[in-house]
Image (spheres, rainbow, N blue to C red):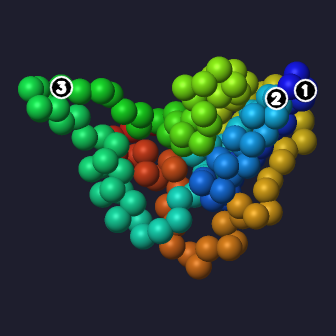
Amino acid sequence: MKVSQQVVVDAEGQILGRMASLVAKMLLTGQKVVIVNAEKAVISGNKQSIIEEYKESVLSKKTWKMPEKGPKKYRRPDMIVKRVIRGMLPYKQWKGRVAYKNLRVYMGVPEEYTNQPKVKFPEADVSRLAGRYITVGELAKEVGWKS
C-alpha cells in the first residue's frame, strides 16, 4: 500500500462530488494528492437552493440545551473541499485516517506546484452541466467567508 506518488489535481471547472470520489479512491491506494484552485470547483444545482441548504444543514449550531452554542463549521473554500473528500473516506478506520493525511488542499496555486503537471478528470468536467452551478468560492462568500 506504500506507493507515495504525488498527484497534483487542478479543481478549476471540476464538479466537486465527482472529483472528490476519484480523489478518495486515489488516496486509498496510497497516493499523495494535492488539490489546487479549490475555490474554483463547482457544485451542481440551483444556486439559491445550494446556499440555503448549506446554511441550514452545515452551519446550524443548534443543540437542545444551548441553541446558540455548537460545533463550528467550515466557511473557507479549501476546508469545504477537504471536508467533502473526508466524507468519502472511511475516516474512522485506520486506513481512512492514513489516506486523509496524504491530502493537501490549496486555494490558488502555490509556487512549488506551478511547474508540475496537473490532472483534470474528464468525467468531472463542468461542461457536463447545463449551466446551473455555483463555485465553492461563491458559496463560501455567501455563508460568511471573509477572503
Q: How many marks?
A: 3
Q: Which mark is residue 30?
A: 2
Circles 1 and 3: CB distance less than 8 Å?
Answer: no
- The residue pinned by badge 3 equals 69
**Circles 1, 2 touching at the beta carbon (< 8 Å):** yes
Dot 1, crowdedness within 10 Å: few (<14), some or many (≥20)?
few
Residue at 9% x, 26% y is 65
Residue placed furthest toward the bottom = 130
Q: Quadrant of residue 99?
A: top right
Residue type at mark 2?
A: Gly
The quadrant the C terminus occupies is: top left
The mark found on residue 3 in the picture is: 1
- In space, the residues marked 1 and 2 are separated at their CA atoms by 5 Å
- In the displayed structure, 13 sits above or below 26; it is below
Q: State the residue lying farthest toward the left.
A: 65
First in residue order: circle 1 vs circle 2 = 1
Q: Amino acid at mark 3?
A: Lys
Image point 50% across, 40% down: which residue? 80
The residue lying at 33 percent from left, 56 percent from top is 53
